[in-house]
Image (spheres, rainbow, N blue to C red):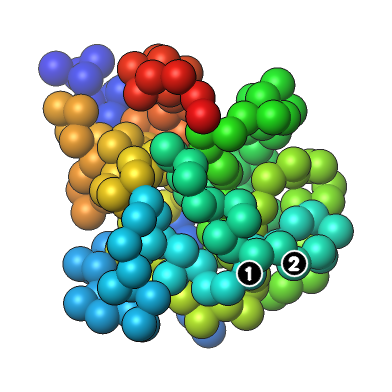
Amino acid sequence: MSTVLASITLAISSLCIAPQDGAAKPALSPPPAKAPAAIDAKTADTGSHAKIMAMFGDTLEMKDGTRVKTKDVIAGKKFVLLYFTASWCPPCRKFTPDLVKFAKENPDAKDFAIVVVTSDRNAPAHMGYMKKYDMPFYAVPFDASGLRKIKQAYGGSGIPNLVVLGEDDVAMKGSYETDGKYTPKNRQSYIGPQKVLAAFPAMRTKAGPKS
């Protein structure tokens, strides 16, 4: 029993608790909420990833600040990987190079896209983080109106958190997991992003040929 408790304590201590704006010291992020009933008119669109694209907004950004159309990045992808992270989080800085390496090993992948959802305190810190780690993926702009909605719908109470969404925008796997089910409201279910990344290649294979 002591071994199990020690493992749980170690897992929880390996994540950062995202501070709320204006808080004097770190506090739990707002607990994940059910996705809003109506995000905007685009949510009614049919097709894969309509819900998350509506949350992202019209554009995503790259590490150099270039804005690209969200639909050009996401449309037609079998998976969208949401990476909840921040430059001030030591465990994030430890994991980020592994995610960067994976992305660079799959530069022409047509079946998935990786999108950063930042918990940084300002835009310069967010962009500096992307540049420093040479992130070859995309990010929700710091000023995007849907940033908080994404965190409420898919984020957990701490970071780093890697979440795999299927074409219906349902979380298939994430850094909070109980019996194979994503459980972001349960902080003690934290398994970390490494296990999610390690499982993703098999998920791609199971999904079939990459278009």
Q: Which residue lies at the image location 24% right of the left edge and 15% below the top edge?
A: 3
Q: Which residue lies at the image location 19% right of the left edge and 35% below the top edge?
A: 181
Which amino acid type corresponds to the residue marked 2 in the rendered image? Arg
Left or right: where does residue 62 sit relative to residue 194? right
Q: Secondary structure at mark 2?
A: strand
Left or right: where does residue 203 sit relative to residue 53? left
Image quarter of residue 129: bottom right
How crowded pointer 1 is (Cα within 10 Å; few <14, some 14-19, many 20+) is rated as: some
Left or right: where does residue 135 sit relative to residue 16? right
Which amino acid type corresponds to the residue marked 1 in the rendered image? Thr
How crowded pointer 2 is (Cα within 10 Å; few <14, some 14-19, many 20+) is rated as: some
Q: Is residue 75 above or below residue 66?
A: above
Q: Is residue 47 above or below residue 161?
A: below
Q: Are marks 1 and 2 in contact (CB under 8 Å)?
A: yes
Of 71 and 134, which appears nearest the observer? Answer: 71
Question: Residue 59 bears which disc, if any?
Answer: 1
Image quarter of residue 113: top right
Q: Secondary structure at mark 1?
A: strand
The spot of residue 143 in percent (x, y) is: 62, 79
Q: Quadrant of the N terminus?
A: top left
Of 17 and 71, which appears nearest the observer? Answer: 71
Question: Residue 162 bears which disc, if any?
Answer: none
Of 149 and 166, which appears nearest the observer? Answer: 166
Residue highlighted by disc 2 = 67
Of 85 and 47, which appears nearest the observer? Answer: 47
